[in-house]
Image (cartoon, helix red, strand yellow):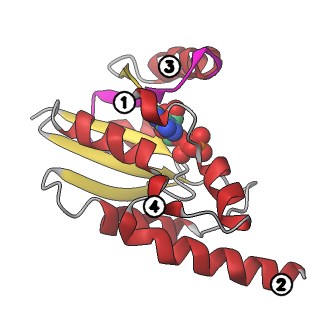
Amino acid sequence: MSTAIYPGSFDPVTLGHLNIIRRAAACFDKLIVCVMINSKKTGMFTPEERVELLRRSTERFTNVEVDFSNELLAAYAKRRKAHVVVKGLRAVSDFEQEVQMAVINRKLNPRLETMFLASSDKYTYLSSTIVKEMARYGANLREFVPCEIVDDVNRRMREMEGKEG
Ligand code: ADP
């Protein structure tokens, strides 16, 4: 069985992520979308909440599993018996860091290959950071995040603004 991992912070999942998930899920028997926990960063959503938002957004894909991990990606892949890491590339700016990560991951786990999917052109501008900015200014989020989670993002932004103000 071919299993691939799509790692990221997904804070929150965007339509750009979902586009990569849909396309990668068509290439492998199983795709594990993994929220990688970076303890230094506090995000808009907790890792558990990000998993829940991802699960809700990917329910229709029967071969997609959502998980989270605070392990090194190379170790996580070994444990889950996955041989491929999928990454989305938006622009040349993503490239340098992603190639560096791919080389390091393969050094740590020589059986692990990284495959890059080029972002669909309508999502090349999209990132979780842009989504947070848009939410702060009250923009319509339907063009940016899965419809299942629009209300969650708006609600959390209002809570955060309330605390700051
Ligand atoms: P972000 O940069 O949005 O915070 P993540 O750290 O969650 O994203 O990214 C996880 C993976 O998804 C990375 O491989 C990243 O390049 C990819 N990705 C993020 N946004 C897009 C997009 N709009 N189109 C294609 N790939 C994307």
Name which residue type carries label 1: Val
Give the label on residue 102, or none. 3
Name which residue type carries label 3: Ala
For label 1, being within 8 Å of ligand 1 is answered yes
Name which residue type carries label 4: Arg
C-alpha span from label 4 to label 1: 25 Å
Dot 2 and dot 1 residues touching (CB under 8 Å): no
Dot in front, 3 or 4: 4
Determine if residue 18 is in view: yes
Q: Which residue is mark 2?
A: 163
Membership of 86 in magenta stretch = yes
C-alpha span from label 3 to label 4: 32 Å
Q: Name the spot of residue 143 as percent of width and height, x first.
A: 46, 54
| Mark 3 surroundings within 10 Å by alpha-carbon count, few (fewer than 14), some (14 through 19), many (20 or more) | some
For label 3, being within 8 Å of ligand 1 is answered no
Against 3, is 155 above or below?
A: below
